[in-house]
Amino acid sequence: MFGRRLAAADGTEVEVIDPGRHNMDSGPDFFNSKIRIGGEQWAGNVEIHVKASDWYRHGHDSDPAYDGVILHVVGVSDKRVRRADGSLIPQVEITMPEDFFRTYAMLSSEMADIRCASRLHTVPALAVTDWLESLSIERVQKKSERVLDICKNCGGDWEQTCFIMLARGLGFGLNGEPFEMLARSVPLRVLHHHSDNPLQLQAIFFGQAGMLDSSLHIFDEYYQLLCREYYFLAQKYGLRPMRQGVWKYARTRPQNFPHRRIAFLSKSCEDGFSMFSKILDSRGSEEDMRKIFGWRLEGYWHTHSSFDVDARAVADTLSQSSVTLLIVNVVVPLLYACAMTRGDADIAEKAIDILSSLPAEVNTITRRWAQLGLEAGSAFRSQALIHLQREYCEARKCLYCRFGHRLLRYSSLP
């Protein structure tokens, strides 16, 4: 913010050649800095304090870890400081305008969810666009790293990885963890053996989900049939169901009950699960992506939202918004992760193009940013806004956010 040329307390010119590495642990604030003081080049550490006297208040004068400090940078030069051997340490005082402290207080607020809200309109449109584009890529990369971890645990099996990602995606946040547990509990090879029998597939999924107990729903013929099928298949493959109580139903509409989502997951395995191959082979258009998730529930789940619970008015396909979320959270991370492993820029570009072509997600986060003038416009942009909120605003990383950094930078100018 202040350039590389500063002035020491005695008037000596100080030039920052290399600030070094920011130390996040104990010890001086910056390691391995290169500083030119009065024409002579030094290499060592830099310590920063609000007041110079904090050097003694923190006990640095008697701590050998601070013997390598070559420059002391302070906001208030109320004292000259020395090392343990008595040698004087060059000191630079940087004074801040009053507006800097007001901006810093604003960004340090405990009350606001978006601390820069009142000044966000002062950030130039180009700076906003650049930062949001970076955030969107950062979010895709973070999701892709998780995909690569799953793929590694699956022995490099991309279809099994895709299956786990799909299951988690069908949990839509609320039941994401239980759905992932469910997918991990059933090897894909077992499902392939029964891909031509929808009833057996459903028996495996509902049984593994811990939702089958022959002492319940005794007059529900379909339910009792699932129980018998699962008992046989569990014995055959050594399957152990998940514990009960992991599924969440709070504030969930009947069409979004985990039972129906499990029915959709079972539908994806009919005729064999090959979703990853379909994703790779597609042209990458939004229409192609939506066709991959074009399942239609039939039979029992056409008229039920749960066991023994009728739901004749409920749609038997996934909604357009649900499919959009699955493309955003399943397809795009899978493609980008694949591109990372293969070093294939075309696949990576395909993933970003898909994200850019999708409509923006509408939720409390995107609505809040829209109130501040940042409209999403596309899923590429809405993903950036979600990432900004969760990884920077909620994590209180205003100094690492380009918006916060820019506001501080310009408020520090005289």
Image (spheres, rainbow, N blue to C red):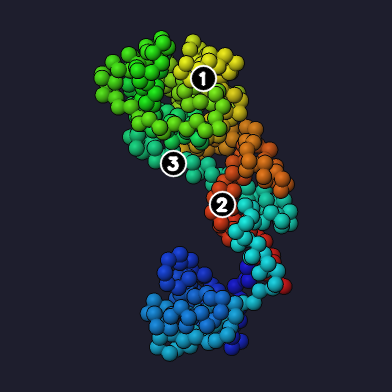
Q: Are marks 2 and 1 in contact (CB under 8 Å)?
A: no
Q: Quadrant of residue 3?
A: bottom right
Circle on res. 251: none
Q: Residues within 10 Å of mark 2 (few under 14, many from 20)?
A: some
Depicted 244 relative to depicted 121: above or below: above
Residue type marked 1: Ser
Residue drawn at (37%, 21%) of the image: 212
**Number of the front mark, 2 or 3:** 2
Q: Is residue 285 visible?
A: no
- Give whichever of 65, 202 is nearer the camera: 202
SS for tag 2? loop
Residue drawn at (47%, 16%) of the image: 308
Q: Earlier in the sequence, mark 2 or mark 1?
A: 1
Residue drawn at (35%, 34%) of the image: 154
Residue at label 3? 146
SS for tag 1? strand
Residue at label 1? 305
Residue type marked 3: Arg
Q: Is residue 9 visible?
A: yes
Residue drawn at (57%, 14%) of the image: 312
Q: Where does residue 35 sit, x and y in percent of width and height?
A: 51, 76
**Number of the front mark, 3 or 1:** 1
Q: Earlier in the sequence, mark 3 or mark 1?
A: 3
**Number of the front mark, 2 or 1:** 1
Residue type marked 2: Glu
Return the residue found at the far bottom.
Answer: 86
Q: Where does residue 263 sit, x and y in percent of width and height?
A: 46, 20
Q: Are marks 3 and 1 in contact (CB under 8 Å)?
A: no
Q: Is residue 26 left or right of residue 190?
A: right
Residue at label 2? 394
- Give whichever of 37, 92 is nearer the camera: 92
Q: Where does residue 4 sit, x and y in percent of width and height?
A: 59, 73
